[in-house]
Image (cartoon, helix red, strand yellow):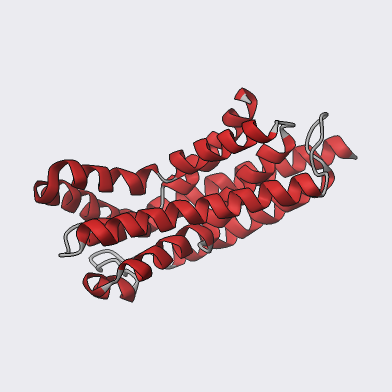
Amino acid sequence: MGKAIGQILPYAAGAAISVVPIIAIILMLVTPKAKTNGTAFAAGFVFGLALICVVAVALAGGSNFSSGSGPTKTVSIIKLLLGVLLLVAASRQWRARPKPGEDPAMPKWLQSIDRFTPVRSFGIGAALSAINPKNLAMSLAAGLSIAQAGLSTGQETATVLIYVLLAGATILGPLVVYLAMGRRAAEILGGWRTWLADNNATVMCVLLLVFAVVLIGQAITGLSGSS
């Protein structure tokens, strides 16, 4: 189990560094519905992470993708495709970065976040963790790694839970700060939001590129070993 946890840690870190979801929950936490919408958004984000990871574990385990001697060819090919997906996403982030002096572009739905309901907040949170290409790739890769580790059902469940908590830490963190400090947290959270908005494109481009190289490297190693 320790080996499996070590393998999923980079993927959890990759999913945790999600700029738009962090900005979204910070904005929610300064609205009149901060507590209900913030909690619903965080719950949705965690649910999306868990859903993709569990599905990956179930499919990989059910298809006998696990291997005691190392990654199977099928898993290696999947990781290669995920790595290519992240390369494409990194390229898009780089091209979309703001020019010097230009305000960073944010999703238009953030402008109406004060009118969100808890249901919509949950749905947006789940979509940002389960459909976003980076987080989708991270959760799939984590699930595949867990499935390959040869763990018992209980150990798999515990490892998935560890992944979800670590990957969702940057969303749960602002919520905890708000619940602990109330409105006094606005200044702290506001500083986080400003920095993230200004550096979104650069942070995401570097992150996507790093994990693309990691996944492609793992895929090449696995394919070489299985040939």
Residue found at the far right of this picture: 227
Can residue 76 be spotted in the picture?
no
Looking at the picture, how far across and down is residue 216, in whole percent? 68, 46
Image location of residue 9, percent across then percent down = 53, 34
Q: Nearer the viewer, residue 3 or 217?
A: 3
202 shown above or below 179: below
In this view, the residue in front, 174 or 85, is: 174
- In percent of width and height, residue 28 lies at 24, 61
The quadrant the N terminus occupies is top right
Q: Nearer the viewer, residue 18 or 92?
A: 18
Outermost residue toward the front in this view: 154
Residue at 65% x, 53% y is: 55
**Residue 204, quarter of the rendered image:** bottom left
Q: Is residue 65 left or right of residue 151?
A: right
Residue furthest left in the image: 184
Q: Is residue 158 visible?
A: yes
Residue at point 76% right, 44% down? 61
Q: Quadrant of residue 177?
A: top left
Q: Quadrant of residue 154?
A: top right
Relative placement, left or right, of 187 versus 117 is left
Point 19% across, 47% down: residue: 178
Q: Quadrant of the C terminus?
A: top right
Residue 59, percent across and down? Answer: 74, 52
Q: How many marks?
A: 0
Could you tell whether 70 is left or right of 101 in the image? Answer: right
